[in-house]
Image: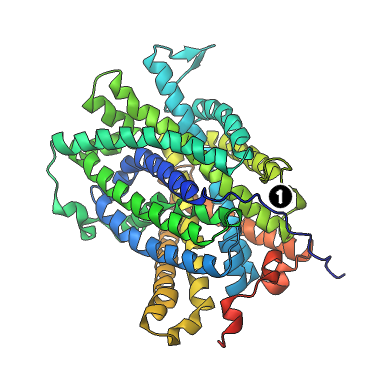
Amino acid sequence: MSSAPPSPRPALRRSLGVVDGVAIAASSTAATTSIAIGMGTIATIVGLQAPALLLLAFLPVLGIALAYTRLNRSEPNCGNGYTWVGRSLGPWPGFLTGWVTLVGSVIFCAYTSAIMGSVVLAFANKAGLRSLAGIALDPTSTGVCTAVGLVILLALTALAVTGVRGATRFQFGLLVFEYAVLLGFCGWALVTGDHAVSLSWFNPFEISSGTAFAQGMVLAVFFFWGWDAAFSVTEETKDPGDSARGGLIALFAMLGLFLFASVAFQREMSLAELVRNGPQALGYLGEKLAAEPWATLPLLALMFSAVASVQATLIPTARGLLAMGRDRTMGPLWTRVHPRYGTPAAGTVVVMSVAAVIAVLAFAIPKLSDMLLAAVNAIGLIVALYYGLTALACAVRFRASWHEGPREALLAVAVPALSGVVLLGLGGYLGYSYLTMSDHFELSPDNGWFMFSLPAVIVLAGLVMAAVAKYVRRSSYFTTGRGTDAEALTLPMDRTAV
């Protein structure tokens, strides 16, 4: 049976002038969340070498950013990696790239709901409210925190549906407050901290093992996740170059913020304090440096950051699903564009609903810090996978540039290829380490089989969904490797003999 012709491409509303805002606001708010929950978490893995790993992780991520920039310039598409990898490496890895990107984003929304709930409960505790209707309001409990966070998700869904411009304005309002608090407290910690800055903090050879190094690197790469949000709204701007500019500005801003914060945390807190407080390290920093009510400000900044991070994740996730839906690799539901707001409203609502279900499933890990560590590691591995595949797609697509001079060869082929190989190699090594570190299965971030099973299930589910798209929906994507909208584009590589 022949496949039906592709449906007309749903148009997203053009929103000139907001892409830099989406990129910077999305990445900056995600950066605040990463700092809040990540500084203590990464210390449990690599000790005080977080600054070293953040610097090292930035190098392949910068290579990925250059790949995104070049690919976006030749083929702007809200599906980005899904479309680019499908065209260059084939439809199966292309679909898998889109799938793991979307699933990782949904998991992020799910566990961030618990962070939002934890902060609300911490405020309740500060106000003297420690139980309600017989339920302990414990900010370290996965179940209670998630239940509170799900209420906040409902409001964020409504805001995401109303459009990119309104979401960006809201994020910038939160961003000003977050930055003021974070820079103020971290700056004070740098000045008054009791622990002297040590060059060993920037020495990755101080890390105890190869497994710890690989896990720390993957976690550090996850810290930078979010800079590519601008490329998901590239079809809502008139100039695709806006996406590249916004993404690169955001990436360098994140590097500076991460290094500043990691040194500040370690100036003020010992390794034991960082490990003990884990995802609550930012709140603990506030309590160490200031009396009430000022000590509450970091918690408020974390709340704003978590709220804006979920909102910033919803925007590219729904648009990636729209790109897959119009190729019929996913169902028609994802192609429904709101007649008034010009956004994929139905997809946004479903994404949030799935995130809520996953958040409820996380009740199986009762301790919040353990649940967050498991989620962050799983997302880190799949982020390394889809970034790596996208970088390799760039190198393959523009391989003819190898003969166009050293600069083109370096930027279009060598740097993306090396960055992709590094990330895929790290992910592969870490996966192997997980498989060999345990002899039984247990729902714990210390159990290798459990840590390996999370990304493995995501990848296997992606292959099953790819088979459904190919053999049941009979999507033309699996014949051409190109998105339906890409058929109308003549790319530079189409005019170059390869």
Q: Does residue 305 appear anywhere in the picture?
A: no
Question: Which of these two is toward me, 47 or 76?
Answer: 76
- Picture layout, residue 180 above or below residue 258: above
Question: Which of these two is toward me, 422 or 215?
Answer: 422
Q: Which quadrant of the figure contains the C terminus? A: bottom right
* Disc 1: which residue: 334
Question: Which of these two is toward me, 202 or 61?
Answer: 61
Horizontal side, residue 328 vs residue 13: left or right: right
Q: Does residue 384 appear anywhere in the picture?
A: yes
Q: How is the image coloured?
A: rainbow
Q: Quadrant of residue 189?
A: top left
Residue closest to the far right? 1
- Picture layout, residue 173 above or below residue 312: above
Horizontal side, residue 480 vs residue 27: left or right: right
**Residue 195 placed where, x, y %?**
14, 40
Question: Which of these two is toward me, 456 or 185?
Answer: 185
**Residue 309 placed where, x, y %?**
48, 40
**Residue 444 placed where, x, y %?**
45, 42
Task: Tell me the kind of residue under disc 1.
Answer: Trp
**Residue 93 placed where, x, y %?**
59, 67
- Measuring 20% from the left and 34% from the top, which residue is drawn there? 188
- Measuring 45% from the left and 24% from the top, which residue is drawn there? 120
- Tally the marks: 1
- Measuring 49% from the left and 47% from the top, which residue is drawn there? 22
- Label 1, residues with CA under 10 Å away: few <14, some 14-19, many ≥20: many
Q: Secondary structure at mark 1?
A: helix
Horizontal side, residue 413 vs residue 477: left or right: left
- Picture layout, residue 477 above or below residue 291: below
Q: Which quadrant of the figure contains the N terminus? A: bottom right
